Image (cartoon, rainbow, N blue to C red):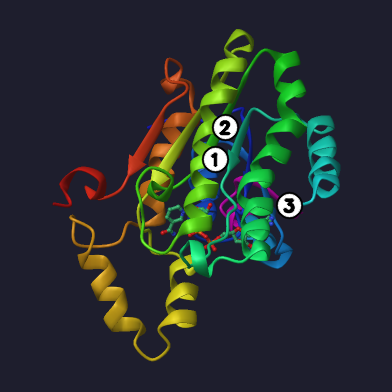
């Protein structure tokens, strides 16, 4: 089991879905987790439940799209205990092809999914450099690797996140800072439930089954199945791994035909 004892881990979007599972697993493996979310109520609930298990967690309101919001939270975190691990997990979705994507849609996705990760990495990189140690993990998506139907803006944003992963991994090699990404296929979280509710009201169960069958393994992933890999990639067990993207996709990329 990967060990995160004595590490402080910041997880953005830790109040729900994949981020919640990562926060819970990291805390169970000994990390002190800092849960950042624009929805502080969710983040506080996750932190409270973790503390109820006698593990370490705190919740922080933070809109990653806002540089000043991110700077304020990260300055406080760097002062109080430092940051060993950053997981850029918070993200939002958008459905639509090129013609259906408005200028505002593209800006909104870019501000959260691309600039959000940039703000967070930029706010802690000098701190990690000074310590000559750090791990950054970006939660991308297979949408950034292949052409997913009707996901123009979302795919663009995840492709940018993959490129940021490689760029940061390269530039900070001399400082012992590792940077990797995980690219999940469809994982059953409130993100998916919200999409079904919005786009397939009344037919949620039917479309849920269809989407599950569309993945070669025959089901959606569970948030914990992403969290296990995240835990390994943020632990010292993966000390030789940097600049790599890992699909967690139930065979989607290789077994779909
Ligand atoms: N669920 C999937 O099928 C799937 C597949 C591939 C990749 N992903 C990626 O995984 C990540 C997590 O997805 P999820 O399914 O757990 O989503 P989710 O909607 O369940 O949770 C996302 C969390 O991020 C928070 N958040 C959103 N915007 C924010 C902002 N501006 N600042 C701070 N927090 C913000 C939300 O409040 C929420 O708590 C996303 O980046 C998503 O793109 C998800």
Q: Which residue is mark 2?
A: 164
Seen at 38% across and 42% down, the residue is 145
From the top left corner, tell me how far across and down residue 41 is, in percent. Answer: 71, 67
Left or right of 172 in this view: 226: left
- Mark on residue 113? none
Question: For the image shown, how many numbered marks are present on the structure?
Answer: 3
From the top left corner, tell me how far across and down residue 181 is, in percent. Answer: 47, 35
Ligand 1 under 8 Å from disc 3 Cβ: yes
Real-space Cα distance between discs 3 and 1?
A: 15 Å
> Who is closer to the viewer here, 253 or 249?
253
From the top left corner, tell me how far across and down residue 236 is, in percent. Answer: 48, 21
Quadrant position of the N terminus in the picture: top left
Name the quarter showing ligand 1: bottom right
* Number of residues whose C-alpha sits closer than 10 Å to that of mark 3, classed few (under 14), some (14–19) or many (20 or more): many
Real-space Cα distance between discs 2 and 1?
A: 6 Å
Q: Earlier in the sequence, mark 3 or mark 1?
A: 3
Disc 2 vs disc 1: Cβ atoms closer than 8 Å?
Answer: yes
Ligand 1 under 8 Å from disc 2 Cβ: no
* Above or below: residue 44 compared with residue 75: below
- Mark on residue 65? 3
* Number of residues whose C-alpha sits closer than 10 Å to that of mark 2, classed few (under 14), some (14–19) or many (20 or more): many
From the top left corner, tell me how far across and down residue 140 is, in percent. Answer: 48, 44
The stretch of residues the image draws in magenta is 49-63
* Above or below: residue 104 compared with residue 37: below
Task: Tell whether position 52 is magenta.
Answer: yes
Seen at 21% across and 47% down, the residue is 251
> Who is closer to the viewer here, 156 or 1?
156
Q: What residue occupies the far left of the structure in this picture?
A: 257
Task: Tell whether position 79 is magenta.
Answer: no
Q: Which residue is mark 1?
A: 160
> Who is closer to the viewer here, 215 or 43?
215
């Amino acid at each position: 089991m990967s060990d995160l004892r004595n590490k402080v881990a910041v997880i953005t979007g830790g109040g729900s879905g994949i981020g919640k599972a990562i926060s819970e697993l990291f805390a169970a493996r000994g990390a002190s987790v800092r849960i950042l979310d624009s929805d502080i109520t969710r983040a506080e609930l996750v932190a409270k439940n973790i503390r109820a298990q006698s593990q370490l967690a705190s919740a922080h309101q933070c809109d990653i799209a806002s540089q000043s919001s991110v700077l304020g939270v990260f300055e406080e975190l760097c002062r109080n205990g430092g940051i060993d691990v950053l997981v850029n997990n918070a993200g939002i979705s958008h459905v639509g092809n090129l013609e259906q994507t408005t200028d505002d849609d593209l800006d909104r996705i870019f501000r959260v999914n691309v600039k959000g990760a940039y703000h967070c990495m930029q706010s802690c990189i000098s701190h990690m450099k000074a310590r000559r140690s750090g791990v950054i993990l970006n939660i991308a998506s297979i949408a950034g690797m292949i052409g997913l139907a009707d996901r123009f803006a979302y795919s663009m944003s995840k492709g940018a996140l993959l490129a940021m992963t490689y760029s940061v991994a390269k530039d900070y090699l001399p400082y012992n800072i590792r940077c990797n990404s995980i690219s999940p296929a469809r994982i059953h979280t409130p993100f998916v439930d919200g999409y079904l509710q919005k786009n397939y009201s009344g037919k949620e169960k039917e479309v849920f089954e269809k989407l599950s069958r569309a993945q070669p393994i025959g089901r959606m992933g569970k948030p914990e199945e992403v969290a296990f890999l995240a835990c390994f990639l943020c632990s010292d067990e993966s000390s030789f791994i940097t600049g790599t993207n890992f699909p967690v996709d139930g065979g989607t990329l290789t077994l779909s035909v």
